[in-house]
Amino acid sequence: SYVLTQPPSVSVAPGQTAEITCEGTNIGDKSVHWYQRKPGQAPVLVIYYDSDRPSGIPERFSGSNSGNTATLTIIRVEAGDEADYYCQVWDTDSDHFVFGTGTTVTVL
Amino acid sequence: QVQLVESGGGLVKPGGSLRLSCAASGFTFGDYYMSWMRQTPGKGLEWISYISYVGTTIYYADSVQGRFTVSRDNANNSLFLHMNSLRVEDTAVYFCARGSTGGSHFDFWGQGALVTVSS
């Protein structure tokens, strides 16, 4: 089955940039979506189709996807960005949705 | 506004059964595919089932295949997950989520329902 690997944690100072990677074989050939989950809250879609932002998501959030790595970038990080982030794809070979292992973003 | 509200969670013994419900409002339920996901304590999100707009196409994760059954009632804007032969490792918060129109992502999620499998 298709596997998506993310770093367990990323720490960043307020105002700096956080980059969260999502590695998968030829992930650049797939559409990658990203979700933010804060404790006790429903997950929120923050990026879809690699780099599109849903309405209401700040422009500070952006995404890219190429080769074997997709990346979620958060610029000018704020305390409120502290959360778990998950990448997700649809695997056509297995007809399964696949989530990444998840990354905890800590704002120092 | 779009709302998804899960219910039916609780404590069940290993080998037992439980049915989760997801009440949808604020959109035309039958126009969207739906899925169930779960998050186990201290672990990540796991997709577990998909059901198409009218329920003709269904997929399951290997971890629940043969034990869980997803269904929907478009007339009553409801999604269900019937869980049988529950295991301790099925303990998790279960989320229902709305699939995007023509896409492969989930644009709205419920708050989740806790299922605890323990003797």
Image: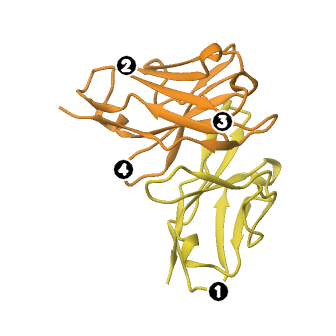
Q: Residue sitting at 40 percent across and 45 percent down?
A: B40
Q: CA distance from mark 2 to mark 4?
A: 20 Å
According to the rendering, which colour does chain B have? orange
Image disc number at residue B41:
4
The answer to whether residue B88 is above or below residue A69 is above
Is residue A89 or residue B51 the one in the foreground?
B51
Q: Position of residue A71 (x, y in %)?
A: 71, 65
Image disc number at residue B98:
3
Is residue A58 or residue A74 the one in the foreground?
A58
- Residue type marked 1: Gly
Mark 2 chain = B
Q: Residue sitting at 50 percent across and 65 percent down?
A: A8
Q: Position of residue A65 (x, y in %)?
A: 79, 60
- Name the residue carrying label 1: A15
Mark closer to the chain start, 3 or 4: 4
Mark 2–mark 4 contact, CB under 8 Å?
no
- Residue type marked 2: Asn
Is residue A97 or residue A108 the one in the foreground?
A108
Mark closer to the chain start, 2 or 4: 4
Occupied quadrant, residue B29: top right
Q: Residue sitting at 56 percent across and 23 percent down?
A: B79
According to the rendering, which colour does chain A have? yellow
- Name the residue carrying label 2: B84
